[in-house]
Image (cartoon, rainbow, N blue to C red):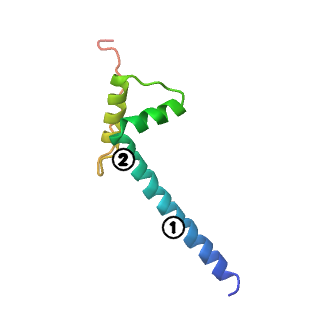
Amino acid sequence: MNIALPIITLVVGLIGGFAIGVFYLRRQMTTMQNDPEMLQKVAKQMGYNLNGKQMQRAQQMLKNNNQPGRAPAAKTKQGRKGR
């Protein structure tokens, strides 16, 4: 019984930490999609310099992908017609 308590505590801590991390990350993503300056800052940290059109496209993508109950659209290959 002595070893069970630390193991249970560890498992509960890991599950709780994961849940808090997911909540924090989702909140940051919704904040970023509404704040163009934050999105620009993240893009610069990744080595990208976005112009106005690219910023609008990135914000629209974030909005579309973060809607609950909606799966992201699958990309289809555009083949040549009439082969």
Q: Is residue 74 visible?
A: no
Mark nearer the N terminus (2 vs 1): 1
Residue 10 lies, in percent from the top left, at 62, 71
Q: Nearer the viewer, residue 3 or 58?
A: 58
Camera-nearest residue between 10 and 73: 10
Residue type highlighted by circle 2: Thr
Residue 32 makes an appearance in the image: yes
Q: Position of residue 80 (x, y in %)?
A: 34, 14
Answer with left or right where residue 17 lies relative to residue 58: right
Q: Identify the mark at residue 30; answer none if there is no mark.
A: 2
54 on left or right of 43:
left
Residue at the (47%, 24%) spot, across then down: 49
Q: Amino acid at mark 1?
A: Gly
The image position of residue 17, as x and y in percent, is 53, 63
Q: Which residue is at 50% across, 30% downward?
A: 44
Placement of 5 over or under 61, stated as above or below: below
Q: Which residue is mark 1?
A: 16
Helix, strand or loop at mark 2: helix
Which residue occupies 68% across, 87% down?
Answer: 1
